[in-house]
Amino acid sequence: MIFSLHFSCTSQVVLKNKKEISSKDMESLSVADNFQYQNFKKITFDFLVEDSKGEPISRALFSFNGIENNGEENVFYSGITKQDGLVKIELKVPHHFKKVQIKISKNNITQSFNYPLDLSSPRQKLIFK
């Protein structure tokens, strides 16, 4: 047995108290000079993970944690260091993160490092002890 059902429905939306927006209203709109239209900024993270002897640490797990004003942490990216211990990546960091902390884990040990949010930061050395 094959059943076939066909439905047909229509909907109509009625707008009441419709207000037209004139171009004059848009011209009078005032936006502060420092207003940021994007809700993120692109930051290139460039760091080298080394042990206390200066040897690169390969295949270490890392995560980027955004720290909000209230201290709440949110992971927004994670990965693994390359063979040479390097990580270089451009990420979109939400503006509401006031700090970025990088957590690195290897052999059941985790360390945290604060990362500068300066867009022109040179390569950082993160010494994993």
Image (cartoon, helix red, strand yellow):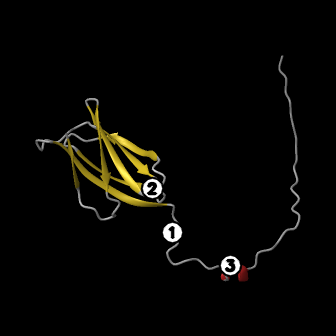
Q: Which residue is mark 2?
A: 97
Distance in Å between CA atoms under marks 1 and 3: 18 Å
Q: Residues within 10 Å of mark 2 (few under 14, many from 20)?
A: some
Q: Nearer the viewer, residue 51 or 16?
A: 51
Foreground mark, 1 or 2? Answer: 2
Which residue occupies 82% across, 72% down? 19
Q: Mark 1 highlights which residue?
A: 36
Disc 2 residue type (three-letter): Phe
Label of residue 83 in the image = none
Whole-number angstrom distance, CA of label 1 to CA of label 2:
14 Å
Q: Quadrant of the C terminus?
A: top left
Residue 72: image location, x then y, percent? 47, 47
Question: Which residue is the extreme one toward the front?
Answer: 70
Tell whether 29 sits left or right of 109.
right
Which residue is denoted by mark 3 in the rendering? 26
Residue contact at pointers 1 and 2, CB within 8 angstroms: no
